[in-house]
Image (spheres, rainbow, N blue to C red):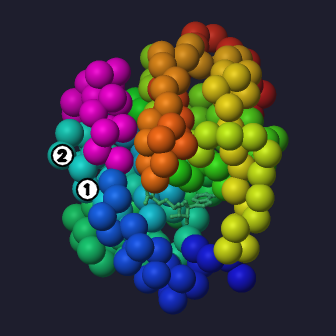
Amino acid sequence: MDYYKTKDSVEEYIRLAKDVNGSQLIEKLKKFLPGSSTLLEIGSGPGTDWKILNRDYEVVGSDNSQEFLSHLTSNNPAGTFLELDAITLNTDDRFDGIYSNKVLHHLKDDELINSLKRQYDILNPQGIICHSFWKGDGSEVFKGLFVNYHSEKVLREFCEDFFEISMIESYNEFEPEDSLLLIGRKKKDIATNS
Ligand SMILES: C[S@@+](CC[C@H](N)C(=O)[O-])C[C@H]1O[C@@H](n2cnc3c(N)ncnc32)[C@H](O)[C@@H]1O
């Protein structure tokens, strides 16, 4: 059973993550994405970052877990939340920015590349991506969930066809330099065939 799909494990995640938020990442995003821009958050989970993003942006939250989506909608009745898988991002909406915090590490390499292609498609011209990852090599299964680790080099390779990298920076989540933040800007005129 997928950890993020059951009521008990989602309640556990919300409890364990209650003192963690992406405010330092969002401060970096604000240097590249002007206030009032439209922004899609992928994998909003408990909605902690959604609330912070909502202060500055026209933010739409999303997740592929019904349990998280019902938590998000009941806690934020005025918010907009979509059921979206990070890989397919099946929406007709277009955005100035796309943000995720510790979500895309659940994708396999080919899935991440497909997600980045799709992000390119649903971004407005000059659109910004801002995503965090666990830093390292290889992958593992933790609590039944696939977890992929990324190096700066690999992230650059995956992104460079679609995005100009504005910054890739290490930061501390639980341990020194255990995480990477990537911010990129949509390149002009790339054919993605999707
Ligand atoms: C580690 S939690 C992070 C949640 C939130 N961003 C935070 O910072 O607390 C991962 C989140 O990504 C969601 N998720 C995992 N795989 C996903 C996918 N393929 N598409 C969309 N959301 C996904 C999970 O449901 C969960 O909400």
Q: Residue furthest bottom?
A: 8
Point out the quarter of the image occupied by ligand 1.
Answer: bottom right
> Which residue is rendered at x = 28% and y = 28% of the image?
30
Q: Residues within 10 Å of mark 2 (few under 14, many from 20)?
A: few
Q: Amino acid at mark 2?
A: Arg
Image mark for residue 120: none
Residue corresponding to mark 2? 55
Q: Quadrant of the C terminus?
A: top right
Q: 43 or 93, which is in the foreground?
A: 43
Residue flagged by tag 1: what amino acid is it? Lys
As for residue 39 lying within the magenta part, the answer is: no
Residue that extends furthest to the left in the rendered view of this protein: 55
Mark 1 and mark 2 residues within 8 Å of each other at the beta carbon = yes
* Label 1 Cα crowd, 10 Å radius (few <14 / some 14-19 / many 20+): some
Q: Position of residue 31 (x, y in %)?
A: 29, 22
What residue is rendered at 40% in x and 61% in y?
81
Residue labelled 1 has its Cβ within 8 Å of some atom of ligand 1: no
Residue 57 percent coordinates (x, y): 25, 40
Q: Which residues are magenta?
A: 22-36
**In the picture provided, is 75 more to the left or to the right than 169?**
left
Q: CA distance from mark 1 to mark 2?
A: 7 Å
Depth check, front residue: 33 or 135: 135
Element type at mark 2: loop
Residue 51 circle label: 1
Q: Residue at x 73, y 61 (%)?
A: 146
Q: Residue 36: horizontal and vertical position, in percent?
A: 22, 33
Secondary structure of the residue carrying numbered label 1: helix
Against 119, residue 61 (above or below) is below
**Residue 33 lies within the magenta run:** yes
- Taking the image as drawn, is residue 118 in sight? no
Q: Is residue 60 left or right of residue 150?
A: left
Give the position of the N terminus as an image quadrant: bottom right
